[in-house]
Amino acid sequence: MPVTPDGPPATAPVNPLALIRTRGYAVLLVMTALLGIPISAVAFGFLALVSELQSLTYTDLPRGLGFDGTPSWWPIPLLALTGLLVALTIKYLPGEAGHKPAEGLVSTGAPTAAELPGVALAAIASLGAGVVLGPEAPLIALGGGLAVFAVRAAKRDMQPNAIALLGAAGSFAAVSTLLGSPLLGAFLLMEAAGLGGAMMAVVLVPGLLAAGVGALMFTGLGSWTGLGTYSLVLQQVPHADRPDLAGFGWALVIGVAAALFGTGIRRTALLLQARVEPRRVAGTVLTGVLVGVAALVYAEWTGNEASDVLYSGQSALGPLLADQAGYTVGTLVILVGCKAVAYSLSLSSFRGGPVFPSMFVGAAGGLAMAHLPGLDVTSGFAMGVGAMCVAMLKLPMTAVLLATLLLGTEGVTVMPLVIVAVVVSYVLTIRLSPAPAPAPAPPAESH
């Protein structure tokens, strides 16, 4: 069906690439650029609010109550209260507060206008209090929902396929710089949506335009406010050795380990989700308490801050790599275990995205393995990120790009190892996943 902003849909099959030559497609590109400005501004405000809430709840509030620093037990009551707020939002506001992170990063379409408040409230409460989830899924939903709402308010007779395209572009704008580059966000959205073939170009062009506009807005707002762009950036990347036979051996090991570990995290989250949903309020509050306990165990066991376990890990990835020499093998193993437990619990009950915690768990695991012979720090870090990311998301291209582009020139060096680790993890993860139910047979024709 042709993508045009108005008029009746054509019924004859049309070459998707021919749509790009139409006047209607040019109009859609203009609309995409215009929508990208306010949507990226809203996304920037969302991330700024979450950042301020994280500082307020974990640093300013304990000091305001007279504590000398943040007590290691502080996350327990904080996350219990957050669990109550999120549970009530899911239970009573339309749309169940959007995407269920335990089910992966899947394309479910843009939320309706009535569902947007619940999506925003549950995500802000979850992320602001330190739940182990990221902002990418809520931003994708909010960007798409706001774009669809604006388009329908301005032009009621627009075709559904054009509305869907603009909704996708809104999502591109919202996550334009979150992963460090507009291209990474574009690949994430395309792979999650299963786009391919000639139709991919039809959706990709307005998506990239929205992402470019969004990146410019994030850069401008970050400079104007002094808050930065909230982008994933690694400042100090150690030198990586050129791949050798030992490195490829480690790629196999890390790929297998990530598939097994990631499958355990995901299955536990789905099992807990099924237990929490029938008793939403009590279950989510208890889950929040257990996330706080995981952070407390890590803090008391290692002497480090409980915040290492809390939050998505987006802003902690750079310091983890830069300061890796300060982490012993034992500390890294405890960190991986506690973060994985908190991640699985968060996936089951709260609202947010699964990408950044998977990257952090994989990075910490790769750094722990780098203490063994034959594996350098940067290679272990990159392979761990890619292998765990694909185990949780099942998006192999996105996993390879996330693990390599962020490392700059060192990422190019380790890319062959990352590809092997990602492929091994992906194939084993698919083998460990339940087989899809067979499609129902078509009804027999009556004669």
Image (spheres, rainbow, N blue to C red):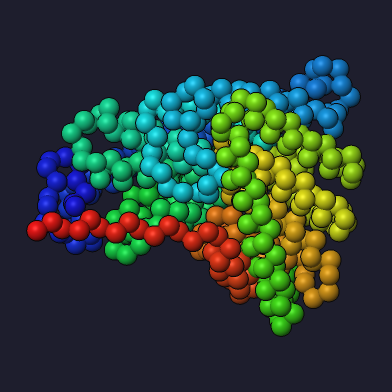
Q: Quadrant of the C terminus?
A: bottom left
Q: Is residue 153 above or below residue 147?
A: above
Q: Nearer the viewer, residue 47 or 282?
A: 282
Q: Is residue 388 left or right of residue 71?
A: left
Query: Residue 321 location in percent, x, y?
Result: 75, 56
Query: Residue 273 location in percent, x, y?
Result: 59, 40
Q: Which of 234 and 91 is in front in this view?
A: 91
- Name the residue located 83 percent from the left edge and 51 percent from the top edge: 334
- Name the residue located 54 percent from the left edge and 64 percent from the top edge: 430
- Name the residue located 20 percent from the left edge and 58 percent from the top edge: 444
Q: Residue 249 falls in which quadrant of the image?
A: bottom right
- Name the residue located 18 percent from the left edge and 52 percent from the top edge: 2
Q: In this view, does 127 lie above or below 315?
A: above
The outermost residue toward the top is 65
Q: Is residue 251 visible?
A: yes
Q: Residue 244 falls in which quadrant of the image?
A: bottom right
Q: In this view, does 64 lie to the left or right of 382?
A: right
Query: Residue 255 location in percent, x, y?
Result: 65, 68
The outermost residue toward the bottom is 245
Q: Can residue 45 be seen in this view?
A: no
Query: Residue 104 location in percent, x, y?
Result: 53, 49
